[in-house]
Image (cartoon, rainbow, N blue to C red):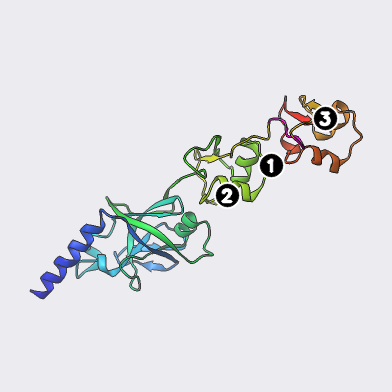
Amino acid sequence: MKLILSLLTLSILYCANTVNAISGQVTYYNDVGYGACGTAIDANTQFLAAVPPAYWTTANPNLDPVCGKQVKLTYNGNSITLPVRDKCPGCPTNNIDISAPAFTQLVGSLGPGRVSVTWEFLGGSSSGGTTGTVSTTTGGSGTCPRTATVSAGQGCYDVWVSNCNNAWDENQFYAANPGVSCTALQVGQKLCCGGTSSSSSTTGSASCSRKGTVDAGQGCYDVWVSKCNNAWNENQFYAANPGVVCTDLQVGQQLCCN
């Protein structure tokens, strides 16, 4: 009777947590071998999760209904969905362990080792694999004035400079895109470009008295010397045009000649 009541209690606990998000911590591991679900795992390369003992309800863990369930973890605006393939013996009820590549994709690196997350069971089943499903909330707020879409092969720098036409500034990028994992961008993902674009005139002051317009094939030197009729002086150029990216000028862009 005690065994039946114990199993019933655990079943109720399990069912309750399939609905409500759990606040806890996530760690990572890199074991290779067989997981508690009885299947071969490689936590160095596969995307998978190991859940606490409290969610296991059968004597034979290989047959436990928790195996193959999916869990969704959310950290700092990023979410990842993983299959349950293993048990985390040392995890309290509200914590969870995930494979090393999954941790990297969710958090950005293995460096922190442990971070606070919310997580929940989603139901359904999955055999696991080498990728996880990630969605990223971008922008410092829900009203980002300019966004850019990630193309194949692009990283955060590429999108910020080439697509957004901004001079690279790590602090500005992360202020506009808090929580973005630059090592796990997805094709089609949108990043916030911030409030203004450097493809328009970038001037040293609000009252630039002379401007030169970029023509096809021209660089900063060409505009400064040919259009502005100035002797080339790098310090003077960037003082008049702070933040301009000379390798990414746009035809029609105006530069300050002051």
Question: From mark 3 to mark 2, how far is it between C-alphas?
Answer: 32 Å
Q: Which mark is residue 207?
A: none
Q: Where, by quadrant of the figure, is residue 26 drawn?
A: bottom left
Q: Which mark is residue 167?
A: 1
Amino acid identity at mark 2: Tyr
Q: Which quadrant: the C terminus?
A: top right
Nearer the observer, 100 or 202 = 202
Query: Mark 2 sits on what residue?
Result: 174
Nearer the observer, 153 or 254 = 254
The residue at the far left in this view is: 1
Task: Work out whether residue 75 can be spotted.
Answer: yes
Mark 1 residue crowding within 10 angstroms, few (<14) / some (14–19) / many (20+)? many
Question: From mark 1 to mark 2, how far is it between C-alphas?
Answer: 14 Å
- Residue in the picture at 33% in, 70% down: 92
Q: Where, by quadrant of the figure, is residue 197 drawn?
A: top right
Name the N-terminal-most of marks 3 and 2.
2
Query: Mark 3 sits on what residue?
Result: 223
Q: Position of residue 248 (x, y in %)?
A: 71, 35
Mark 2 residue crowding within 10 angstroms, few (<14) / some (14–19) / many (20+)? some
Q: Are marks 1 and 3 in contact (CB under 8 Å)?
A: no
Name the N-terminal-most of marks 1 and 2.
1
Amino acid identity at mark 3: Val
Amino acid identity at mark 1: Ala
Q: Where, by quadrant of the figure, is residue 73 drawn?
A: bottom left
- Residue in the picture at 29% in, 65% down: 38
Q: Position of residue 227 (x, y in %)?
A: 85, 26
Query: Magenta region: which residues?
Result: 200-205
Name the N-terminal-most of marks 1 and 3.
1
